[in-house]
Image (cartoon, rainbow, N blue to C red):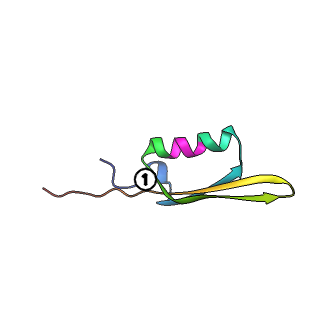
């Protein structure tokens, strides 16, 4: 089990972008890497365009046996 995020990524990430398939794929890829959703998603309007945000965290517990 990895105790640190892969590829030197930070433990906390705030993914943002337009509300489209590419954004959903970015969130899905983070989950596939082992990140967990953190908090509720947010949505805002920027000039009539929807912009969404989702925080993800790397939360891996190391068990010592």
Front-most of residues 20 and 58: 20
In the picture, measured across the screen, residue 60 lies left or right of residue 13, that is: left
Left or right, 58 with respect to 40, comes to: left
* Majority secondary structure of magenta residues: helix
Q: Which image quadrant for residue 51?
A: bottom right
Residue 12 left/right relative to 18: left
Given the current orientation, which residue lies at the most extreme right position? Answer: 47
Which residue has dot 1 on it? 5
> Looking at the image, which residue is at 46% across and 41% down?
32
Residues in magenta, as a range = 26-30
Instruction: Find out whether residue 29 is within the magenta segment.
Output: yes
- Residue 63, position in %: x, y? 21, 57
- Residue 28 part of the magenta-drawn span: yes
- Which quarter of the figure has residue 25? top right
In the rendered image, which quarter contains the C terminus? bottom left
Q: For the point 56% across and 46% down, which residue is it? A: 27
Q: Percent x, y for residue 41?
A: 60, 56
Looking at the image, how many numbered discs can be counted on the residues? Answer: 1
Question: Which residue is painted at 55% across and 59% down in the image?
Answer: 40
Crowd around label 1: few <14 · some 14–19 · many ≥20 (10 Å): some
Secondary structure found at label 1? loop
x%, y% of residue 2?
33, 49
């Amino acid at each position: 089990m990895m105790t640190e995020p892969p590829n030197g990524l930070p433990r906390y990430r705030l993914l943002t972008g337009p509300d489209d398939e590419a954004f959903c794929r970015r969130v899905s890829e983070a989950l596939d890497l082992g990140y967990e959703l953190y908090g509720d998603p947010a949505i805002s309007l920027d000039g009539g365009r929807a912009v969404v945000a989702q925080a993800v965290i790397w939360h891996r517990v190391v068990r010592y046996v």
